[in-house]
Amino acid sequence: MTSNLSQVWTNTLELIKKELGDDIAFNAYYKNTFFNDVNNNIVNIIVEDYLAREYLNTNRDFIEDNFNIITESNFKLNFILADDLNKEKNDNDDIQSNNLNVPLTNLKKDLTFESFVVGPSNEQAYKAAIAASTNPGNIFNPLFLYGDSGLGKTHLMHSIGNSIVKNKPNMRILYVTSDEFLSDYLFLSREPSTENNDYFNNKYRNLDVLLIDDIQFLQKKEKTNEMFFNIYNNLFNHNKQVVITADVNPSKLNGLTNRLVSRFNQGLSISITPPNFETSINILKNKLSFFDETGEAIISDEALKFIATHFSKDVRELEGALRTLLFQLINSESNLIDLKIIHQTFKDFNFDYQNKELTSELIQECVCNYYNLSKSQITSKSRVNKIVIPRHIAIYLDRILLETPYEKIGKLYGNRDHSTIMSSFNFVKKKIEANDNDFKVAISEITKLCKTT
């Protein structure tokens, strides 16, 4: 029975993928799910993280219908985290949206989910953005994305707007920076009139989706805070979607009123961090496709890896390094960016040009060296703490630095199954989120070791 239902789930995923016709949503939420077991007609499905669980719970009826079409039965589905198999959370709200036909403003059409490069540093934000665009006003509202400049917050914000325009064309959407909002409010304050007041209210209150960028620039502007608070309340109370970005977590926005910060915290806040090596490589390849559409290589693999290793502070830094090298290529006799051109271009930087390529085996080797363990020990079935902790960290780093699939990591560590590998990853992730200093120091030191070995 169990093996049959496992195959049924696989078949259900294939059916859902065809019905959705949307690879982005499927890959983000459905792809990394697995059948676990069945109890009293309830089928337990393992999901990768809590965002996926929330999204799948919201679409439970649709998924159960497809599952039961294949089984010709009446099973109920329960979505559970890999490291928390006994927890349940159900969220089956139906989504309602109004139909106001108002022109779209200020969206950049090239900033879409399709052009966004996903990696461990932004995956949670990406998934939340897709959910917000799929069910605006209902799930993850407000959605608050935060992180340093140049990491993709604005790209995701425009992606949400463009996705809604495509799938819900009658919705009113506005993308605006906090500077633009401030400018509009100051103009209204200086030039008060019925006409200007109507314009302002129509622009900011009669919306289905408000996307406001860099909210931190409204700090210490009390009257502007008050106006935005009223606009936010009006939208939120009418189930309209609000998406906000900032450079810090909402709780650290000390220059905003407490009640406004409290409203931000009632939704979902997700950070975006600098891209890892593998994500940096993919970002560079994505950017290269815009510079050269012939498909011919204009940069060597070694040069690409070098840029990803040394210019990965943020996406803009990656793009800047790439543009600098492309300029050098145009002004040279070569038709290929290689390490020689990189050395000439960045001669004033103190770089090590002899780094090894980062691999799962190298990560494993570095963890073993750090903890003075052998490969046979870290891949064994031992549950001794001094071996289990390094194994968890090695699995976490393999996933974060290389985005290696859970199944492949499992094969490297004694053929462990995907749920065990997920649990190891989530164990370390929770330690880091809880600011466990021992784990943070170990991961930082091992990461440096991996990049300098």
Image (cartoon, rainbow, N blue to C red):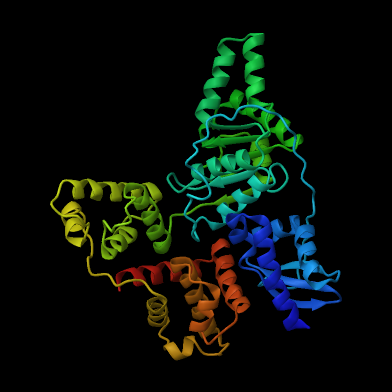
Looking at the picture, tell me which residue is in the foreground, 149 or 342: 342
Q: Is residue 323 left or right of residue 281?
A: left
Where residue 304 sits, quadrant-wise, is bottom left
Looking at the picture, tell me which residue is in the foreground, 328 or 12: 12
Taking 72 as reference, is 216 above or below it?
above
Where residue 363 sits, quadrant-wise, is bottom left
Q: Which residue shows up at 41% across the image and 82% down it?
A: 368
Residue 356, x across and y down, in percent: 29, 72
Split into 4 quadrants, where in the image is the N terminus?
Answer: bottom right
Residue 382, x across and y down, in percent: 55, 90
Q: Which residue shows up at 77% across the image and 70% down it?
A: 70
Q: Is residue 234 visible?
A: yes
- Number of labels in the image equals 0
Split into 4 quadrants, where in the image is the C terminus?
Answer: bottom left
Q: Which residue shows up at 26% across the image and 56% down it?
A: 298
Residue 33, x across and y down, in percent: 65, 69
Q: Which residue shows up at 57% across the image and 35% down it?
A: 212
Q: Is residue 366 left or right of residue 266?
A: left
Residue 286, x across and y down, in percent: 40, 53
Q: Is residue 389 visible?
A: no
Taking 130 as reference, is 259 above or below it?
above
Looking at the picture, tell me which residue is in the foreground, 144 or 307: 307
Taking 221 as reference, is 160 above or below it?
below
